[in-house]
Image: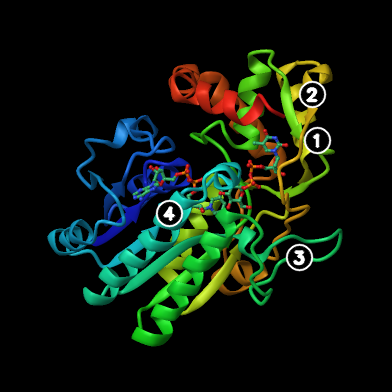
Amino acid sequence: MRNILVTGGAGFIGSNFVRMVLAEQPDCLVVNLDKLTYAGNLENLAEYLEHERHKFVHGDIGDAALVERLIDEYAIDAIVNFAAESHVDRSITGPKIFIDTNVSGTLTLLEAARDKNISRFVQVSTDEVYGSLGSEGMFTEQTPLSPNSPYSASKASADHLVCAFGHTFGLPYNITRCSNNYGQYQFPEKLIPLMINNAVNDKDLPVYGDGMYVRDWLYVYDHCTAIWRVLEKAPSGEIYNVGGCNEKPNLEVIRLILDHLGKPDSLIKYVKDRPGHDRRYAIDASKMIDELDWRPSVTFEEGIVKTMDWYLSNTTWLANVVSGDYQKYYETMYSGR
Ligand code: NAD
Ligand code: DAU
């Protein structure tokens, strides 16, 4: 049996990863530590909460005593760190919690991993640590870190700490840097689920700036298979870019959603831009493909249809996440734009 500590496993990508591991890896026990912030949702794991190989623990990655106890109690041999504050817009209005969780919280996990001789620490990072691209080129693992938002600066700090723990203390580690994910269970503060939810409800679709910002979209299941592949196969100390070769301007994604849902383009509303908005991300994932034999399983055209159909069939999940605090968030974030 392989016992892994997954942090942030009630969030979007973490819950997809937990579901995938429980379904596909019969020899793996998952201890899932999550603080259940606004982005953490146990409904993402509904059928798996009582699963015999899944132990959910409500807690903070910054709680050193708790992390150490879990490592001992479950004989943990690897940690996969998804836990983070993940939304760029929120990092602009309130950066402090991003430092607390993404930097200090990661440091707490690293200290526990070092002290308990964990055999592998996988840090789930982002392509945003590389900064922004012009119209040409792609991020490789050698691209210098140049983060632009408080969110990406906190993730880059965490990446540096992970490498420093490898270099200084010999902690075995990997870092994955992935492009934009989409798919089931994504909280509707992010572009794709926000646009689906608004379009379904005939609400305006708020497009930042000219809508020609480019993101490189990866279906969430494919990100999860990449992380598992790294955990299983990667030599310690290696960093891997993960991406789907699916560069799209935001407007193209939004028009595709409107088209699939049979809604008019007139719902598009151009609003004030995000401060410091990165123009373009594009990932060169050839190291993952050549060295770890990983490939995305779906094209963007297949994945986006699966995603829209999932949101259309999971109206209770969506209704629950957009009730209460989400309404206040939406009002605050979008009323002045
Ligand atoms: P998310 O916001 O959906 O989920 C984050 C999860 O972390 C939530 O369940 C939350 O409750 C939990 N959490 C937050 N603070 C915590 C703390 N202090 N202790 C324990 N748990 C805590 O995020 P996501 O989109 O699933 O992203 C997961 C990871 O992947 C993040 O590290 C993010 O930086 C990275 N990433 C995300 C994307 C993307 O497109 N969403 C792309 C690349 C990398
Ligand atoms: O690249 C990986 C990153 O992708 C992850 O590290 C982050 O955790 C994740 O949130 C995501 O960051 P982005 O800022 O790229 O994602 P977001 O969905 O917030 O925005 C995608 C694009 O859509 C971006 O150009 C901003 C634009 N946008 C977003 C929202 C929410 C809009 O035009 N309108 C909106 O209402």
Tag in front: 2 or 1: 2
Front residue of 300/274: it is 274
Q: Which amino acid, by three-letter code, is at mark 4?
A: Phe
Alpha-carbon span between mark 2 and mark 1? 9 Å
Residue 26's x, y, as percent?
A: 29, 52
Q: For disc 4, does the CB lie below 8 Å from ligand 1?
A: yes
Amino acid type, callout 2: Ile
CA separation, marks 4 and 3?
Answer: 24 Å
Q: Is disc 2 surrounded by few (<14), some (14 to 19) or many (20+) residues within 10 Å?
A: some
Colour option used: rainbow
Q: Residues within 10 Å of mark 4 (few under 14, many from 20)?
A: many
Task: Say if 235 sits above or below 295 in the image.
Answer: below
Residue density around tag 1, few if under 14, some if 14–19, many if 20 or more, within 10 Å: some
Identify the mark nearer the N-term, 2 or 4: 4
Please tell me whether mark 1 sits on a helix, a strand or a loop: helix
Mark 3 and mark 1 lie on one chain; the one further toward the N terminus is 3
Asked if the residue at label 2 sits under 8 Å from ligand 2, the reply is no
Describe residue 250's horizontal placement relative to residue 330 as left or right: right
**Circles 2, 1 touching at the beta carbon (< 8 Å):** yes
Q: Is residue 41 left or right of residue 262?
A: left
Q: Which residue corresponds to mark 1?
A: 251
As helix, strand or loop, the secondary structure at mark 2 comes to strand
Residue 138 — which label?
Answer: 3
CB at disc 1 and ligand 2 closer than 8 Å: no
Name the disc covering residue 82, or none. Answer: 4
Classify the position of the N terminus by image quarter. bottom left
Q: Compare marks 3 and 2 and give the one earlier in the sequence.
A: 3
* Front label number (2 vs 4): 2
Residue at screen point 60% across, 46% down: 92
Real-space Cα separation, disc 4 to disc 1, in angstroms: 29 Å
- Residue found at x 78% / y 18%: 267
Mark 3 is surrounded, within 10 Å at the Cα level, by few (under 14), some (14 to 19) or many (20 or more) other residues, namely some
